[in-house]
Amino acid sequence: MTTNMIETDGVDLWTEEFGDPAHPPILLVMGSMTQGVLWPDELVGRLVAAGRRVIRYDHRDTGRSATFDFAEQPYTWHDIKDDVLRVMDAYGLESAHLVCHSAGGLLGQFIAVERPERVRTLTVIGSSPLGGHEGETILRALTGQPQPEGSLPPPRPEFTAYYTQLITAPPPADRREQVQRMIDEARVLHGTALPFDEDAERRLQERVLERARDLSSVVNHRLAHAACPDFEPEGVLGRVQAPTLVIEGTHEPAKPGHGAIIAEQIPGAELLMIEGMGHMMPPQVHAELAAAIIRHTAT
């Protein structure tokens, strides 16, 4: 395992590489406002043991990557998308297997449409279809607005209830409250089917807090969306050429049913439902997740 801080186009991005550089490369792309270390170490280890070169990284404004004064240096989700290609370029990868989680799945889908020659295979986990505007669906759910016909399925009630109260909650008073809030959020995203390990989650969130240059800078991802709300092209998933695996948990709280819509729109895509999984990737599902990714990236 080696860590590298890559600098490209004025952006410093923290990256971490595992495995033999001669092995097929997998680039892990996390979701919005989320550090690369949220890709579970055990899952990464299983992929490496199966003969994969694995790279994960922190998005801009998360973890150890560069933070921005958004008023002075605004950007959009097009820039966050292009950071995926910047990481590939820095490692000399003409193409890679993209394995993407949540909003990272939107980035992976967009790149598969826009730059098909750079995507060997695509795996999206807990994501929404590109062009579906899932952010608008979630916002309507949180503000009690009706969902127009044709909208994506809304989040589950427990998700809506938690984030509705969070919107009006005061900021955490201290570090202890900050960590507890991060744990509470993870518990909701974990789903209701599998046991939740609060001690393990506390260790992970302490790690996230320690790694962050500026934890508050993650809000810039929301500002980036507001700066270009039409980031997502519509009606383009039929152009995806990469073999695609779509993974969703049966207890997905944030984007239930979105995986099936992705699989319907991408030619030849496979849908895998993982029993008990919510939005996150807990230890109970690592073996099944890894086996699916290993099989898919062997194509």
Image (cartoon, rainbow, N blue to C red):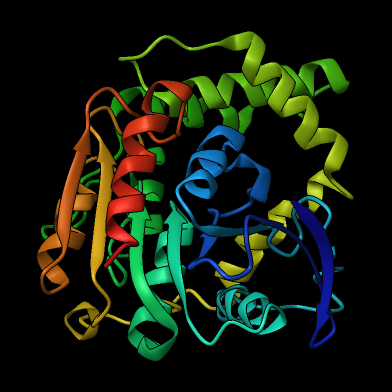
Q: In this picture, is 154 found above or below 236?
A: above
The residue nearer to you, when weighing 282 against 121, is 121
Judged left or right of residue 282, residue 185 is: right
Residue at screen point 15% across, 57% down: 270
Count of labels in the image: 0
Residue 171 percent across, percent down from the top left: 77, 29
Residue 99 percent across, percent down from the top left: 43, 59
Q: Quadrant of the C terminus?
A: bottom left
Instruction: Evaluate whether residue 127 shows in this view.
Output: no
Instruction: Evaluate whether residue 51 shows in this view.
Output: yes
The residue nearer to you, when weighing 169 against 156, is 156
Judged left or right of residue 6, residue 157 is: left
Quadrant of the rendered image containing residue 231: bottom left
Residue at screen point 39% across, 41% down: 290
Q: In this picture, is 126 found above or below 98?
A: above
The residue nearer to you, when weighing 108 against 27, is 27
Q: In this picture, is 139 found above or below 106?
A: above
Residue at screen point 48% across, 54% down: 51
Residue at screen point 41% across, 56% down: 135
Residue 232 percent across, percent down from the top left: 39, 76
Q: In this picture, is 108 found above or below 213?
A: below
Quadrant of the rendered image containing residue 237: bottom left
